[in-house]
Amino acid sequence: MPRYSPTRKVFTSVSKDIKDLPFDEVFELYMSAYSQVKSDAQALADDLYNFRLQELEDMHSSNNPEEGSFEGNFTDVITKAPPIITSAALNKATTLAINQGFIEKYGIAIHSEWILPQVVTLLGSMPLYKNSNGLYSGKQFKYNNFNTNWLKGVLTLTMLNTKSSYLKLQYKNPSKSFGALVPLVMYAQRLNKGIPYSAWDPEEIHHIIHSELVNAMLCRELPIFTREDLISYRKEGLTVKSGATVGTLKNPITTHALSGVSDPMFKQLPSLVQVMLAQIWMAHPENRTKYMVLDPTNWDKMPSPLVSDDVLLKTPDLSVECIGVSIW
């Protein structure tokens, strides 16, 4: 087991071996948070059902004062709705639990430079499985390979959307090899076996890839934007809208999202698709790598630079550092 200081909350093992990290705790934290969200959703559904029953009873009494209470059973009139777990509620609860109970507890961000490469090596060593479509199956990969709580915890950590909780500056080395635009399992298999991303079944990538990137990768039918359109949206989205620096441009190399783009078709796209199309942050030509997904319609494609020799802003490299379903 790893050693850590309850006061400093930092992992202190000198082995630098991921086998010493209690990844089983990640899985347990996830399932505990999921159970709580499910319980809260059930309680809300019960309250809503009881409120509706009381509402019908009150309505009957008001319309029939001489009869008093309804002698029948309103439970025969209305159906009890199942609990609704939203993806936002599930992501918030599970992310918070894992951040506090594992990432902060063991100081994972401090040690990510040796943890993540070992995780990639582990993922790349796992066997692949094809489905009836002749494509690599994310579902079979998950359920055939992650058969212990420790392994489930490893995958659960990689599927967090909040990569910044354990990666410093995702647009810089070494973090950009593991950041938001990198489908980590697919990346590991591509490194180890040369499997292109396009060889995976799109219908099953949600089993192995964090949901924000999945939403972007499945955005296969895009509105038609010209190069001039995208440059215009990029400039508009990088323009500071208020404060002392209003009217100036934020750095496309370091800015992780566009804001205030007026075009409704572009604005409705998933945030990571906007990042890809506008070529900012990790998708900027200065930051990107061939292992990132940079085009939602072609996962293996390295697009031509949108702006050659970035005319929007040039800065030197810094030397300072929907319905929620449980993934299990």
Image (cartoon, rainbow, N blue to C red):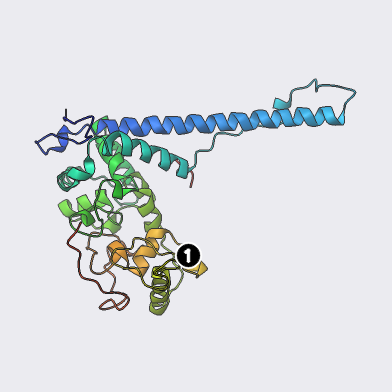
Residue 278: % across, % down? 36, 69
Q: Secondary structure at mark 1?
A: helix
- Identify the residue at image location x=50%, y=70%: 263
The residue furthest front is 244
Residue 34: % across, % down? 42, 33
Q: Give the quarter of the image for residue 7.
A: top left
The answer to which of 79 and 228 lies nearer the viewer is 228
Q: Is residue 328 left or right of residue 6?
A: right
- Give the answer, above or below, for where 28 lies relative to 318: above
- Identify the residue at image location x=24%, y=58%: 196
The answer to which of 265 and 214 lies nearer the viewer is 265
User: From where the camera sits, is residue 148 visible?
Assistant: no
The answer to which of 43 and 260 lies nearer the viewer is 260
Q: Give the quarter of the image for residue 96.
A: top left
The residue furthest right is 66
Q: Quarter of the image containing the C terminus? A: top left
Q: Mark 1: few, some, or many residues within 10 Å (few <14, many ≥20)?
A: some
Residue 238: % across, % down? 38, 69
The total number of labels drawn is 1
- For label 1, the residue is 267
Q: Quarter of the image containing the N terminus? A: top left
Q: Amino acid at mark 1?
A: Lys
Q: Give the quarter of the image for residue 259.
A: bottom left
